[in-house]
Every structure is written in structure tokens, then in C-alpha cells.
Image (cartoon, helix red, strand yellow):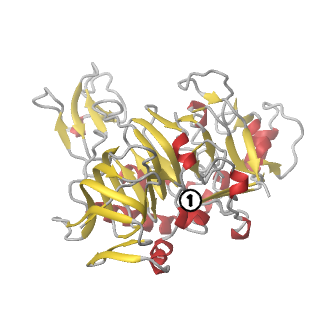
């Protein structure tokens, strides 16, 4: 049995355009008073594929992205290679790597700057959009600097309207869309997460000590001064696989290496001023709040080789191509859709080994009548089972309802997203999360850092905020050279 206190940090997958030789960590003399991995940046999100998370995003700080630079999905280009039968659907204008139709970035509010790589765009569709007479831009070279594209209007080719990536705003109100700061180009942008093999290699370092091992679930501490207790091994009653979960109170200090899946359930954490740092070769599931019992600069940092999933059990709306084809593609350099789908399937397999995991954030869909009354709820998108809403004794068969719309005419009911109905709100703070995929359905505020290849949180009712406390602590020291770099050298 081990008890753990965890700092939460969200990290994303890497921009692979300039190569590992260009990755350089900031030196202490450059960082000044900051000890953060991000130096003087007020980093909140570092996400490689920005379109989905930018839909209605509210960001109190700086945002870093590379639009998938370094692979064939950069700025939504070449998706047709993987989808030859859907060439008319795929384009830079329907891509998680750039924009999702004409409204994703337009609905977001960013109080800081947006950092991007100093690279060029050569996709003919983007060049044509920029050069359109409708846009009125000056003559543009080909290839076109990315910084010029994001700073100027362009024609949204699918419907011939004039738009720009994101509008400008000077309003102090976070609820008003627009960018308050600037787009800033940097020569090297690196966003990544360590692989399972890389995390497991950490246990081979001198001084690492095994805390316990049981049927493939293994936990190490990086050095003798690190400490962990209150983390238990459980066996799933459904799949009979082992996983790790917290006791009511966990104590964790320093660097802990975990081989296996981790379920943090209503965590009460005791840690020290440098926090609890978890490096997990597996998937991480977080349910309920994280309470710090030790005060000070207590924090939780997690780096996962697969995924961090918060407040949700159903993954079919995020991890399958049937949910939305544009959600698939570009998680790793050179990967095909099939390779990513296999990666996603493993996350779902990990999910099935966790007992007690629910869609804690709230139902996915609701059945409504013509008056807008809620008749039934679907808690789990994957199971697709309906239950009567509170106060309702019976409801129509879903087959009688129009799917995706509110009912009109002689339609008795409609099946739509539940959105705010019975949605749970949780505020997280002092958190760092790092994984290829990070998903959450909780409403509320996330005060910390998110770094991921793909990240998607609750739409509209969620705020990302810079956490000044994290500027004063060391972030994920065992994998710093793998997770993030921003350099102008």
C-alpha cells in the first residue's frame, strides 16, 4: 500500500518540425525569479491540435500551439491522404489542427499572447484564402509566413465569407471573445509527452527504489528522499485486471514512477512545497475534486504516456472516428489513422479495468419534448442507455425522436446534447497535466497548465487560468526535456 499526494499539470504532445537538436531548456540565469519550465510566460495551455479546445475557450494567460507542425496534418493539410473517399469533406477548414469550420477560434477569449512556430504555410488552399480579393491583403509570397496568415483576414473558402482566425478585443471581460495580446513567433516550439518506454526507463536511474510490485503493477520512487503512501492496488471485478487508486488521504512528495493505470478518486493530498510528481506508464483517470491538505505551494503534477481523463467514463465521443472523423489524425509523427485508433482503443481498454469510474461530470444527452421539457437522460454515450429524468415516470422510445434537433411539427421528442443540465462544476488549482490526450467534462476553472497533443474540456462553461504559484516550483524534472520547449535561438 502506498499513499500519494499529487500536483496536477497538463502537458501536450510535441511540435516535431525542427528536430531534437533544437530543443533547449532555459537556464536559471534566463529564467530569473521564475523556476517554472515556462520561464516568464504565463502559460496556461500548450496544445498541439488547437481547434477543438479553442471552441468557446476562456484563457486567462498565454496559449502555445504549433498547429501540428512537422507532420502531414500541419494546419489541416493532407488529411485526404488518409481519407481518399471523403476528399470533399476534409480540408484545412475542417481540422482539429487549424480551425473547426468558421467558429472555433472566433468563440474563444484569450487574455494573454499566442505563441506559434516561426514557419511557413504552403498549402494552396490556405494561400488562396489569404490572397483572395475579399481579404484585401497585400501581395503574399508562397510559402507564406504563418505569423502573417494568423494576423490577417482570409476568405473562408467553404462558404465564401471573410473571416480571420480570431478577432481582437481590449475588453477586460473574459466572457467577451477575442485576443487581447499578440501572436508571437518563436523558432523552436516543442510540445510532447514521454512514451511508456521512456517513463519506465526512469526506474533504471541510480538511486531509484521499488516501493511495491504486484502482477505487473509496479511503483518506484526516484530517490530515497521521495515519499509515497496511501496508493492501493485494486483488482477490477469486471476484467480482473489490476489498477492503482488512492486511499481517502494520500501522502506524496517528490518523483514517483508508476507502471499501470491510475484512478484518482476524490483525492485528499498531503505533499510538500515542491509537490507530488507522478510519471505514469498507463492512463490516468481523475474523478471528483483534488483537495490539498498541506497548504503552502502544494501542487500535483502528472505526466502520462497515454491519457488523462477527468469526470467521464464514456470515451466514444472523443476517441472513435465514428464520433467525428476530424478527431483522428496526427497524434504522433508519421502515424496513420489506424495507428492512432489502436492507441485510442488501448485507452478504452484501460478505462474498462477501473471499477467505480462514472460519468461524474453529468449526463451526455437529453431527450426533450416540444416545450423543451427534459424527459430522459443518457449518462453514458458508449452504452447509449436512457433513464427517466427526475420527476418523469415514462418517456417515448428514442426511436420516435429526431436525433440531434429539438422536435417540431408532429415529432414527439428530440435527442440533443445535455449541455448544462445536471452538469457538475469543479475548480482545480495548482495542477499540471501532461499526456498525448487530455479530456474533461467538468465545468469550472482549471488553474494550472495543460500540455497535450489533443485536449478538449467542457465547452463554454470552463476557464483556464495561469497559476502564479507554479512559477515558483520545479515542474516534472525527470522529463522536462521531453515535454516542452520554446526558444528563439
Q: Quadrant of residue 408?
A: top left
Q: Residue furthest front?
A: 225
- Left or right, 9 with reference to 363: right
- Residue 275 showing in the rendered view: yes
Quadrant the N terminus occupies: bottom left
Which residue corresponds to mark 1?
13
Say which of 265 and 249 sits in front. 249
Give me the residue at 82% from left, 32% from top: 133
Quadrant the C terminus occupies: bottom right
- Residue 89 showing in the rendered view: no
Above or below, 261 against 469 in this view is below
Give me the residue at 35% from left, 37% from top: 426
Give me the residue at 48% from left, 65% from top: 340
Give residue 148's position: percent from left, percent from top.
Answer: 80, 42
Give residue 278's position: percent from left, percent from top.
Answer: 42, 62
Say which of 302 and 117 sits in front. 302
Give residue 308's position: percent from left, percent from top.
Answer: 41, 55
Amino acid at each position: 500500500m502506498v499513499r500519494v499526494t499529487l500536483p496536477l499539470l497538463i502537458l501536450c504532445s510535441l511540435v516535431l518540425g525542427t528536430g531534437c537538436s533544437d530543443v533547449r531548456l532555459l537556464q536559471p540565469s534566463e529564467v530569473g525569479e521564475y523556476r517554472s519550465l515556462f520561464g516568464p510566460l504565463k502559460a496556461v495551455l500548450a496544445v498541439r491540435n488547437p481547434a477543438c479546445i479553442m471552441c468557446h475557450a476562456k484563457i486567462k494567460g498565454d496559449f502555445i500551439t504549433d498547429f501540428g507542425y512537422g507532420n502531414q496534418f500541419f494546419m489541416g493539410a493532407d488529411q485526404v491522404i488518409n481519407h481518399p473517399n471523403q476528399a470533399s469533406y476534409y480540408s484545412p477548414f475542417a481540422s482539429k489542427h487549424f480551425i473547426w469550420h468558421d467558429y472555433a477560434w472566433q468563440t474563444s477569449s484569450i487574455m494573454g499572447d499566442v505563441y506559434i512556430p516561426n514557419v511557413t504555410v504552403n498549402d494552396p488552399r490556405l494561400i488562396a484564402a489569404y490572397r483572395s480579393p475579399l481579404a484585401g491583403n497585400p501581395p503574399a509570397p508562397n510559402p507564406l509566413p504563418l505569423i502573417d496568415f494568423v494576423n490577417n483576414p482570409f476568405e473562408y473558402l467553404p462558404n465564401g465569407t471573410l473571416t480571420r482566425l480570431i478577432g481582437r478585443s481590449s475588453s477586460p471581460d473574459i466572457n467577451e471573445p477575442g485576443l487581447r495580446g499578440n501572436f508571437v513567433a518563436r523558432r523552436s516550439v516543442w510540445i510532447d509527452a514521454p512514451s511508456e518506454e521512456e517513463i519506465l526507463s526512469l526506474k533504471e536511474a541510480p538511486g531509484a527504489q521499488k516501493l511495491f510490485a504486484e502482477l505487473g503493477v509496479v511503483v518506484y520512487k526516484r530517490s530515497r528522499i521521495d515519499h509515497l503512501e496511501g496508493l492501493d492496488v485494486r483488482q477490477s471485478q469486471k476484467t480482473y485486471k489490476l489498477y492503482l487508486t488512492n486511499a481517502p488521504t494520500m501522502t506524496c512528495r517528490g518523483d514517483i514512477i508508476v507502471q499501470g493505470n491510475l484512478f484518482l478518486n476524490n483525492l485528499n493530498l498531503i505533499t510538500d512545497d515542491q509537490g507530488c510528481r507522478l510519471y505514469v506508464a498507463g492512463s490516468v483517470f481523475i474523478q471528483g475534486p483534488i483537495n490539498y491538505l498541506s497548504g503552502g505551494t502544494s501542487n500535483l503534477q502528472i505526466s502520462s504516456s497515454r491519457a488523462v481523463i477527468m469526470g467521464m467514463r464514456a470515451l466514444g465521443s472523443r476517441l472513435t472516428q465514428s464520433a467525428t472523423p476530424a478527431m483522428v489524425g496526427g497524434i504522433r509523427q508519421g502515424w496513420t489513422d489506424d495507428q492512432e485508433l489502436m492507441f485510442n482503443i488501448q485507452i478504452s481498454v484501460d478505462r474498462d479495468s477501473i471499477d467505480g469510474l462514472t460519468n461524474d461530470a453529468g449526463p451526455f444527452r437529453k431527450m426533450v419534448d416540444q416545450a423543451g421539457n427534459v424527459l430522459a437522460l443518457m449518462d453514458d454515450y458508449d452504452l447509449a442507455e436512457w433513464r427517466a429524468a427526475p420527476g418523469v415516470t415514462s418517456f417515448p422510445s428514442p426511436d420516435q425522436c429526431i436525433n440531434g434537433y429539438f422536435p417540431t411539427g408532429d415529432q414527439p421528442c428530440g435527442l440533443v446534447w445535455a449541455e448544462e443540465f445536471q452538469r457538475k462544476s469543479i475548480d482545480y488549482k495548482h495542477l499540471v497535466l501532461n499526456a498525448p490526450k487530455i479530456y474533461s467534462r467538468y465545468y469550472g476553472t482549471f488553474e494550472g497548465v495543460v500540455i497535450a497533443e489533443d485536449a478538449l474540456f467542457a465547452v463554454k462553461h470552463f476557464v483556464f487560468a495561469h497559476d502564479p504559484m507554479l512559477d515558483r516550483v520545479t515542474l516534472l524534472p525527470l522529463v522536462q526535456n521531453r515535454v516542452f520547449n520554446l526558444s528563439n535561438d
